[in-house]
Amino acid sequence: MRRVFTVASKKSGRTPYFLCIRCRADVKADSNKELNLDNESERMTTSSRIGIVTPEEAIHHLCVPEPPDPGACCASGCANCVWIEYATELMRYYRDRPLHEAMSEIDRVVPDIGVREFVKAEVRERTKC
């Protein structure tokens, strides 16, 4: 079975991407063989590919990430903090926008001041790289 991922989007960078998956059970996944394009529908299916996108990229453009439950954080400054994961998802969502918009969202959502400043410092450190 061969899966073809296509992406369709509008010109605006803020519109979400849509992931379409088409499966063809009659074609082997061997990329070294030529496709038999005798059938018109097969020709249209293979020529309508726009690009290949990973599911991770498509998922991150759909909606604003949900903040974690405040009780899920231990507030000890651990490396795998739920707020750092949230900030990472937020940075992916706001990647076409200025950094201060993501920082203001972190200010609005993270309740503890110490954790908030820790998360903002981690975000600043990751954006330097």
Image: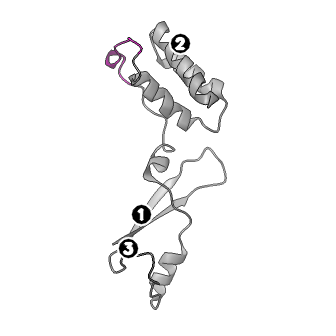
Type of amino acid under label 2: Glu
CB-based contact (under 8 Å), mark 1 and mark 3: no
> Mark 2: which secondary structure?
helix
- In the rendered structure, the answer to whether residue 9 lies left or right of residue 25 reads right
Above or below: residue 31 compared with residue 119:
below
> Mark 3: which secondary structure?
loop
Task: Judge whether residue 24 is colored magenta.
Answer: no
Type of amino acid under label 1: Ile
Category of crowding for the residue at label 3, using alpha-carbon neighbours closer than 10 angstroms: few (below 14), some (14–19), many (at least 20): few
Task: Judge whether residue 70 is colored magenta.
Answer: yes
Q: If you read the primary sequence from the N terminus, does the residue marked by circle 1 or circle 3 appear first?
A: 1
- In the rendered structure, the answer to whether residue 107 lies left or right of residue 32 reads right
Alpha carbon separation for disc pair 2 and 3: 49 Å
Q: Quadrant of the N terminus?
A: bottom left
Category of crowding for the residue at label 2, using alpha-carbon neighbours closer than 10 angstroms: few (below 14), some (14–19), many (at least 20): some
Image depth: mark 1 or mark 3 in front: 3
The residue identified by callout 3 is 29
Type of amino acid under label 3: Ala
Q: Quadrant of the C terminus?
A: top right
Alpha carbon separation for disc pair 1 and 3: 15 Å
Above or below: residue 17 compared with residue 86:
below
Q: If you read the primary sequence from the N terminus, does the residue marked by circle 2 or circle 1 appear first?
A: 1
Label disc, if present, on residue 117 of the rendered structure: 2
- The residue closer to the viewer here, 13 or 115, is 115
Image depth: mark 2 or mark 3 in front: 3
Which residue is drawn at the image coordinates 49% and 31% (left, top)? 88
Location of residue 83 by image quarter: top left
- The residue closer to the viewer here, 33 or 52, is 33
The region drawn magenta spans 68-77
Category of crowding for the residue at label 1, using alpha-carbon neighbours closer than 10 angstroms: few (below 14), some (14–19), many (at least 20): few
> Mark 1: which secondary structure?
strand
Which residue is drawn at the image coordinates 53% and 59% (left, top)? 7
